Amino acid sequence: MSFGLLVIGDEILSGRRQDKHLPKVVELLGARGHALGWAQFIGDDRPRIIAALKEARASGDIVFSCGGIGATPDDHTRQCAALAAGLPLSLHPGAKALIEERMREVAAEQGVAWEPDRPDNVHRLNMGVFPEGATLIPNPYNKIPGFSLGRLHFVPGFPVMAHPMIEWVLDTCYADLRPLPHAEHALYVHNGLEATLTPLMESIEARFTGVRVFSLPSVDHPQRGRHIELGVKGEPALAAQAFEALKDGLAAFPALRVSTE
């Protein structure tokens, strides 16, 4: 089981909005000892959204979906979630109560009477039309809830709403989920090429099953200049052994300069 992220909306792909969900979700998961396993960006395209949600459901992963749960013509996520799960849509009673509570508050702030039968107020209830069986995710910003279907959790595209809602899901639904023990070790290699180091990296992964080697080259770092950040990650004890083996392997290349800072 892994954590996944879906970011839905044409505005992200067109550049009208800059995505803020990916770095924040990485931060929220990291603070709890977890890591993001995958992420996907999708436009307002129903077939693509449905396909992505079907794949997410089949994966068994814990998935956060940001965007598209409003009630305007370019919002498709609620409907796609129902189609992907094979469920009908219906107005969630709890969501209806929260939306009406919010509408009453807005009317009071504006000093006008709340008219529940006014067409725009009736339309706002569509924001609470979820796949049947969905549970609510509270929204501390304006009370308009998101929803969960099993391990799939749907929140608005607005970061100010989405991020505290994701935090709530993590701390309410997965507080007892223990992260797998994990460690990373890295160093910096100067005067080297990835092609030259690839056989060493492959041998480390072959010797230490479950450990992954990573190589992050940089050509214009302001302090280190051209270098490769080379490291290992995995179960702590095994990763430590693999890192020592990596350092021993680098010693066979006398032209390299290796540093840890």
Image: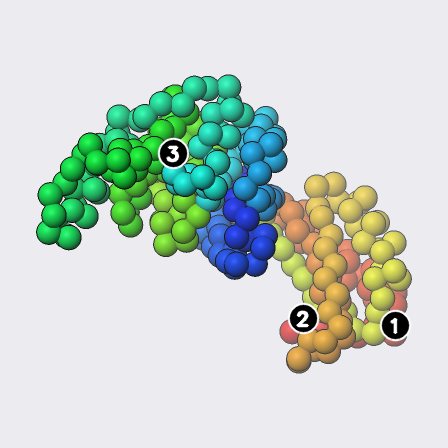
Is residue 21 visible from the viewing direction of this image? yes
Query: In terms of sequence position, does the residue under pointer 2 or pointer 1 come before the other?
Result: 1
Q: Nearer the viewer, residue 66 or 46?
A: 46
Residue drawn at the location 52% of the way across and 58% of the way down: 16
- Gap in Å between the C-alphas at discs 3 and 1? 58 Å
Residue drawn at the location 31% of the way across and 26% of the way down: 92
Q: Position of residue 172 (x, y in %)?
A: 35, 38
Q: Amino acid at mark 2?
A: Thr
Q: Which residue is mark 2?
A: 260
- Gap in Å between the C-alphas at discs 2 and 1? 17 Å
Q: Which residue is mark 1?
A: 254
Q: Nearer the viewer, residue 207 or 74?
A: 74
Q: Which residue is mark 3?
A: 147
Q: Position of residue 205 (x, y in %)?
A: 78, 47
| Label 2 residue SS | loop
Query: In terms of sequence position, does the residue under pointer 3 or pointer 2 come before the other?
Result: 3
Q: Position of residue 42 (x, y in %)?
A: 58, 43
Residue drawn at the location 74% of the way across and 59% of the way down: 215
